[in-house]
Amino acid sequence: QAQLVESGGGLVQAGGSLKLSCVVSGNIFTFGDMGWFRQAPGKERELVASVTRGGSTDYADSVKGRFTISRHNAKKTVYLEMDSLKPEDTGMYYCFGDLLTGIRKRGQGTQVTVSS
């Protein structure tokens, strides 16, 4: 069964950049839509960005113009490039993939911390 493994999180100063990667072990075409959501302590889970199999993208208003999601099926990888980071972007970032059965799978998460 396909699994999702994230990497690329870390500590960065406000205004800096990070690039998260989500590698699919197995067949990436097991998933329809894929993307990223984040969870910060005391805050609701937020869907940050998503991408369809064909490459169409969607973003939360809070990250539009700063984050870019891309899906590379040949590499079995989904990326999230994050620029102009703000302290409020701090949180655990999870990659997800929607199975054709409707079940959403996610990875173990990668921590992003933005210092002011």
Image (cartoon, rainbow, N blue to C red):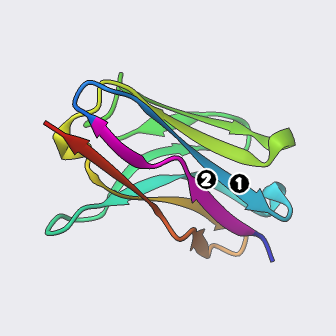
The answer to whether 63 is drawn above or below residue 88 in the figure is above
Dot 2 falls on a residue whose secondary structure is strand
- Disc 2 packing (10 Å; few <14; some 14–19; many ≥20): many
Q: Vertical placement of 93 versus 115: above or below?
A: below
User: Could you say which is closer to the camera, residue 30 or residue 66?
Assistant: 66
Q: Quadrant of the C terminus?
A: top left
Main secondary structure along the magenta-highlighted residues: strand
* Above or below, comparing residue 64 to residue 54 in the picture: above
The secondary structure type at the circle numbered 1 is strand
Which image quarter holds the N terminus?
A: bottom right
| 74 or 83: nearer the viewer | 83
Residue 1: mark: none
Residue at point 66%, 64% (across, down): 4
Other residues around mark 1 within 10 Å, as few (<14) / some (14–19) / many (≥20): many
Earlier in the chain: of badge 2 and badge 1, it is 1
Q: On the image, numbered disc 1 is attached to which residue?
A: 23
Residue placed under numbered mark 2 in the picture: 34
Q: Look at the numbered discs 2 and 1 and tell me whether their residues touch, using CB distance below 8 Å.
A: no
Q: Which residues are magenta?
A: 3-12
Percent x, y for residue 96?
A: 56, 61
Q: Residue 114: where, in percent of width, then height? A: 25, 42
Along the line of sight, which residue is nearer the eye, 23 or 2?
Answer: 23
Q: Left or right of 102: which side holds 26?
A: right
Q: Left of 102 or right of it: where is 76?
A: right
The amino acid type of the residue labelled 1 equals: Val
Q: Quadrant of residue 30?
A: bottom right
Residue 68, position as x, y percentages in the image: 49, 29
Relative to 24, is 86 on the left or the right?
A: left
Residue type at mark 2? Met
Q: Is residue 7 magenta?
A: yes
